[in-house]
Image (spheres, rainbow, N blue to C red):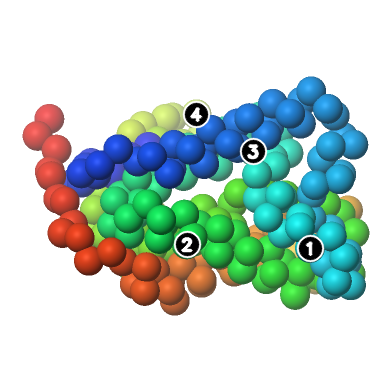
Amino acid sequence: MIPLRDIDRKPSRIPLITSLIIAVNTLVFLLELAKGNAFVERWALVPSEIASGRDLVTLVTAMFLHGGWLHIAGNMIFFWAFGPEVEDMMGRVRYAVFYLLGGLVAFWAQVALNPYAQAPTLGASGAIAAVMAAFLITFPRDRIRTVVFLGFFVTILRIPAILLVGIWFLLQLLSEAGTLAESQANGGVAYGAHIGGFLFGLAFARLFESGRPRNNQAETI
């Protein structure tokens, strides 16, 4: 499933921070392509290094790195589907802080689960998971226009956020449970970071609300 946008709500302001974060991720990805693996290895997070108290700056820099075109495209599509409404609800400054904290907590969760792993960890997924959680607890009934793949058949459905995000989180839990019995030394998807970021969002999103009225504008077509 690929979420596209909320059809029940439109932000009352231009999603400046969401757009800026997407732009920064895109620029950094272009740097990755230009500078090669050495650039990624320098700024990606290695759990064993963090657990040893080294290269702590990568807790931030790794948030803006991606492993390929599909990785960054998928992350940014999910982010654009949920980010603008959360930004509108929190306000720009609180939203930016929330996003960064969500990413930090996500990486710490991944380190805690795999403190001896030496494979680089990178991506915005943990921070985006926090944003998705904030959307879920704030606008659970909003319908998300979603591309759904059913074998060779592709359709677009309007799926309530509570169902769409709930299924996504359940898949993360099941995937992480499946990897706990295996070594992640050779890399893979950091499901622990997804879970950590999501739980942070569930726990703290309400604290970041700005108190502004929540715009709710139903789609008419």
Residue with the mark numbered 2? 98
Asked if labels 1 and 2 touch by Cβ distance under 8 angstroms, the answer is: no
Regarding mark 1 in the picture, which secondary structure is present there?
loop
Amino acid type of the residue tagged 3 in the rendering:
His
- N-term-proximal mark, 4 vs 3: 3
Query: Which residue is found at the position 22% from the left and 66% from the top?
Result: 211
Give the CA separation, mark 1 to mark 3.
23 Å
Amino acid type of the residue tagged 2 in the rendering:
Phe
Dot 2 alpha-carbon crowd within 10 angstroms: few under 14, some 14 to 19, many 20 or more: many
Camera-side residue: 71 or 85?
85
Give the CA separation, mark 4 to mark 1.
44 Å
Asked if labels 4 and 2 touch by Cβ distance under 8 angstroms, the answer is: no
> Where's the C terminus, which quadrant?
top left
Give the CA separation, mark 2 to mark 4.
38 Å
Regarding mark 4 in the picture, which secondary structure is present there?
loop
- N-term-proximal mark, 1 vs 3: 1
Camera-side residue: 176 or 5?
5
In front: mark 3 or mark 2? 2
In front: mark 2 or mark 4? 2
Regarding mark 3 in the picture, which secondary structure is present there?
helix
Residue with the mark numbered 3? 71
Camera-side residue: 106 or 160?
106
Dot 3 alpha-carbon crowd within 10 angstroms: few under 14, some 14 to 19, many 20 or more: some
Residue with the mark numbered 4? 152
Please give left or right for residue 97 compared with residue 119 in the image: left
Horizontal and vertical percent position of residue 38 = 90, 36
